[in-house]
Amino acid sequence: MLSQLRPAIVMIALFSALTGLAYPLAITGIAQLVMSGKANGSLIERDGKIIGSNLIGQNFASDRYFHGRPSATTGPDPADPSKSVDAPYNASNSMGSNLGPTSKKLVDRVNASIESEFAAGRIDVVAADAVTTSASGLDPHISPQYALAQVPSVAKARNLPEQNVRFLVEENTEARVAGVIGEPRVNVLQLNLALDGFR
């Protein structure tokens, strides 16, 4: 029995050290050398302060900024921690709404979002991502169609010519990966940073 137990313990210790320590440390070290920005979360700094990540959307409420798509994330209710409340772009609780296309709650929410967008005067054309949430609730991108639809209201709020704001959208539109993967998209945080830096 001991002759079989000793090799088993040695193998467990060896593979624990290899797969639990050596491999993760090697991969972490390589990632830090080859692509440290991505390995550290694609963080965005401004004036030495971290203001967000390229990978996680933020909730912009002011008319002076482009808005991301709706977010279905929630957080604990401050008044009653046993309940949850809407908390858009809550990175600690990534999730979609999980509502199906026949859900009355989904239809009502989408219709309310459409009415809200029109009432606020932010858009005159409704892109799908203007009223639907992403699977994670943290999507940092919107479609160029949705970004361009917001140009008139953002330009008005900032007292800028629409063509200048449209130019910023076009400059911040990312193409398909390798020309075929995914769809063209606009990172809302990057676009809003470009907007803040526009003179």
Image (cartoon, rainbow, N blue to C red):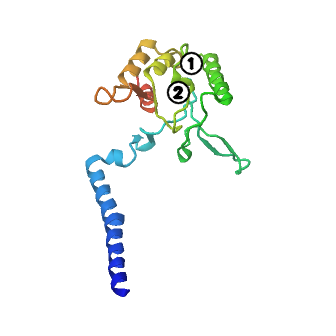
Q: Where is residue 128 in the image (x, y as percent from the top left)?
A: 52, 22
**Looking at the image, is 154 positioned above or below residue 31?**
above
Residue at the far front in the pictured view? 1
Which quarter of the rendering shows the N terminus? bottom left
Q: Residue 136 carries which label?
A: none
Between 9 and 53, the residue placed more toward the observer is 9
Between 87 and 13, the residue placed more toward the observer is 13
**Looking at the image, is 14 positioned above or below residue 92?**
below
Left or right, 136 with respect to 174, comes to right
Between 101 and 158, the residue placed more toward the observer is 101
Q: Where is residue 171 in the image (x, y as percent from the top left)?
A: 35, 22
The residue where tag 2 is placed is 67
Disc 2: CA contacts within 10 A as few (<14), some (14-19) or many (>=20) = many
Q: Mark 2: which amino acid? A: His
Left or right, 17 with respect to 94, comes to left
Left or right, 47 with respect to 58, comes to left
- Residue 122 makes an appearance in the image: yes
Whether the residues at callouts 1 and 2 have beta carbons within 8 Å, the answer is yes
Q: Give the structural element (helix, strand or loop) at label 1.
A: loop
Left or right, 67 with respect to 178, comes to right
Q: Give the structural element (helix, strand or loop) at label 2.
A: loop
Residue 72: name its quadrant. top right
**Looking at the image, is 21 positioned above or below residue 124?**
below
- Residue 199 makes an appearance in the image: no
Q: Position of residue 40 (x, y in %)?
A: 37, 49
Mark 1 or 2 closer to N-term? 2
Q: Mark 1: which amino acid? A: Arg
The residue where tag 1 is placed is 122
Identify the residue shown where x is 36% and y is 73%.
Answer: 12
Residue at the far bottom in the pictured view? 2
